[in-house]
Image (cartoon, grey):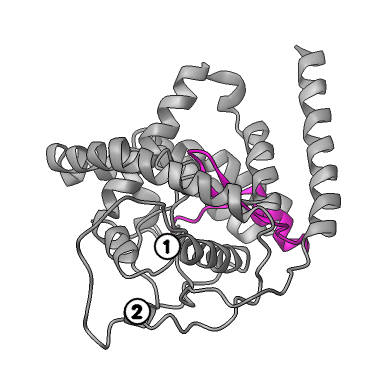
Amino acid sequence: MSSSLAQSLRSVCAVVAVSFVLSACAGTPQTGAPQSEARAGDPQSTQIAQSDTGQSDGGDAWSDSETDNFGPEPDYNDPLEVPNRMFFAFNEAIDFMVIRPVAVTYRFIVPTGVRNSVRNFLRNLRTPVTLANDLLQGDLERAEATFARFLINSTIGLLGLFDIAADSGYPYHDEDFGQTLGTYGAGEGFYLVLPILGPSSLRDGTGRIVDIFLDPLTYLAPREFGLGRAVATGVDFRARNIEELDALEADSLDFYARIRSLYRQNRVNEINNGAPTGEVPNFSEVPPVAPSGVPGPSTSAVE
């Protein structure tokens, strides 16, 4: 057991070291040609399937996307754009054929109160990862709030089914190792679209691996539990954001480029613990892994 733990710790240290080196090498954005995408501080958006809904109001925050006049993307760094677009299309197809129909059915059948309890339970399971990253970032105030949330919700909140801590002055927040690397100045590296997992980067992809090692359930729960947890998180996120994401796609001339820009801007907001700019749809949550193909946002609105 001790040898296994030591091997895991060595793996974490190796991944952290490699991530800093690669992020430092690849983190400087490259300047490139203008891209057709809106400037918005959007919570991470999903690669979703087709929609026939749109917003034509001239005062709408998304109406500018119809002009195709967004200027250059300051942090254009997408050397793998061709394969990225292929994976993006693949993820959209999976969402259209599987994830969106499941999410629509889930929202139709399951009452709102039950869906909120599912989300609260999933958030509570991720608390140890958030706490570890709070501590790694040296943010003791947020670490204290995270620990208090876990203690209150795991007991009075019945294993996290009810978010009693939020009513007690401990609002929800999420942290991951990609954000932790960002707080220490590690560049994002080049942009990536991962099959099933969606938008990422060299830094954030490395962070996903480290978060697996930081999660106690990696060692305590069977693999099937982790898979079910990931699927439930993605379906819950997708069900909460059907209309917003459909409207985003309908208003985009280049959906891939827009998602890329929104993902990057949202990661900056998360690293700085800042709020979105308000130019984006009010997505309700960020799943750590979204089976629909994309991580979600960091706000926590309840339906």
Amino acid tagged 2: Glu
Q: Residue at x 55, y 69 (%)?
A: 265
Query: In the rendered image, is residue 156 in sight?
Result: no
Q: Residue at x 35, y 51 (%)?
A: 48
Residue 4 screen position, x and y as percent? 77, 16
Which residue is labeled 1 in the image? 255
Secondary structure under badge 2?
Answer: helix
Q: Residue at x 70, y 52 (%)?
A: 203
Query: Is residue 194 in the magenta section?
Result: yes
Viewer-closest of 190 and 285: 190
Which residue is labeled 2 in the image? 66
Q: Are marks 1 and 2 in contact (CB under 8 Å)?
A: no
Q: Look at the image and give the residue range highlighted in magenta.
A: 171-199
| Position of residue 294 in the picture relative to residue 99 (left or right) | right
Secondary structure under badge 1?
Answer: helix
* The N terminus - image quarter: top right
